[in-house]
Image: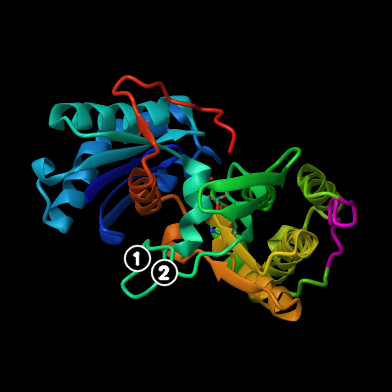
Amino acid sequence: MTLLAIETSCDETSAAVIREGEILSNIVSSQTAIHAEYGGVVPELATREHLRNLIPVIQAALRKANVDPPMLDAVAATRGPGLPSALLVGLKAGQALAFSLRKPVIGIHHHEAHLYSPWISGDPPRGHFAGFEPSVSLIVSGGHTLLVAVTEMFNHRVLGGTLDDAAGECFDKTGKLMGLAYPAGPEIDRLAAAGNPRTHNFPRPMLNEPGEDFSFAGLKTSVRYFLQKNPGLLEDPRHVRDLCASVQAAIVEVLVAKTVRAARRLGVQCVTASGGVACNTALRRDLEGACKESGLRLRLADGQFSTDNAAMIGILAEQKLLAGAGEIAFDAEIEPSWAL
Ligand code: KG4
Ligand code: ZN
């Protein structure tokens, strides 16, 4: 089966061609430079960029895969959740193409694609879900922080999520307070590598509360107050590095502790992590350490499949189609607030 996948839920325009679990191409056109000027994603600009870039990105993905549209057996697109106008561009383009080819169109849940992305593995990476087993899965992105219990393929239950800001949002917003460009997560990661995480003891929200929910708005506020009380601090790069390391340590400690605790509580042997924040060096290192200590197997999404990409959409769509699921009508609507 050869399948084209499209992802336009936020600020990445992406298209991928998948054949029998193999990723023939995965083109990602990121808009972060455009949104950086505004300190966050501007929906109107995101939509305009998707409209401008989607056809060239699809053409590039098909060309790289050496596939002509008539060779496609199906078209998949992200149906939600995400920015409504951004989702519309990708889903409607996918439906139109599938309609013209008289082939099925698959509507994919963006977080479900993140959820299964750690099972894309190998060299070259393949989406065969080899070694798949029940797990507790941490999905950490710019818009969402979710802990999910996966009992079997396509059978999962949300254990908890953020009550306010997402983990990525906390990185981005505290970074903005420090004068870093959007998205600040990767820059905090880089600066923190040379900083001391024990310099400032920022709150670890909900760390010791039972349950699997998160809250990061208080941590952001405490960084804001800290900077108000120490106005000159940002002028010294050494202090900025220590601040980044301390903020990152607070976020990572909560994510790691709650994930491992949930795995222990449910008695699963495996932990997975995905989403943009799963690229974070400290999170990857500390999850590895904590899982080792607790005798848990850890599967981290590869960096290229952590941030938004169409390959994870296509890999999941192919599995769904093989299982007889996921097909939607040519005029099915977007689902901007689709719950996992
Ligand atoms: O999954 P993603 O590409 O888009 C959404 O679906 O939101 O995640 C983007 C988020 C941003 O908040 C970004 O700052 C964060 O992932 N991020 C990181 C790192 N790389 C990306 N956060 C911390 N450390 C990183 N290395
Ligand atoms: Zn995402």
Vertical position of residue 118 compared to residue 293: above or below: above
Could you tell me residue 238's position as x and y percent? Answer: 70, 72
* Amino acid beneath label 2: Ser
Say if residue 187 shows up in the picture. no
Q: Which residue is mark 1?
A: 126
* Amino acid beneath label 1: Arg
Q: Nearer the viewer, residue 294 or 185?
A: 294
Could you tell me residue 168's position as x and y percent? Answer: 62, 50
Is residue 335 left or right of 90 when viewed as pictured? right
Q: To which quarter of the image does residue 185 belong?
A: bottom right
Magenta-colored stretch includes residue 204 = yes
Q: Which residue is mark 2?
A: 121
Image point (14%, 27%), residue name: 100
Could you tell me residue 311's position as x and y percent? Answer: 35, 53
Is residue 188 left or right of 327 when viewed as pictured? right
CB within 8 Å, label 1 to label 2: yes
Vertical position of residue 293 compared to residue 89: above or below: below
Q: To which quarter of the image does residue 94 belong?
A: top left
Q: Could you give the CA–CA distance between mark 1 and mark 2, rounded to whole angstroms?
A: 5 Å
Q: What stretch of residues is rendered in magenta?
A: 200-210
What main secondary structure does the magenta stretch of the protein show?
A: loop
Could you tell me residue 245's position as x and y percent? Answer: 71, 67
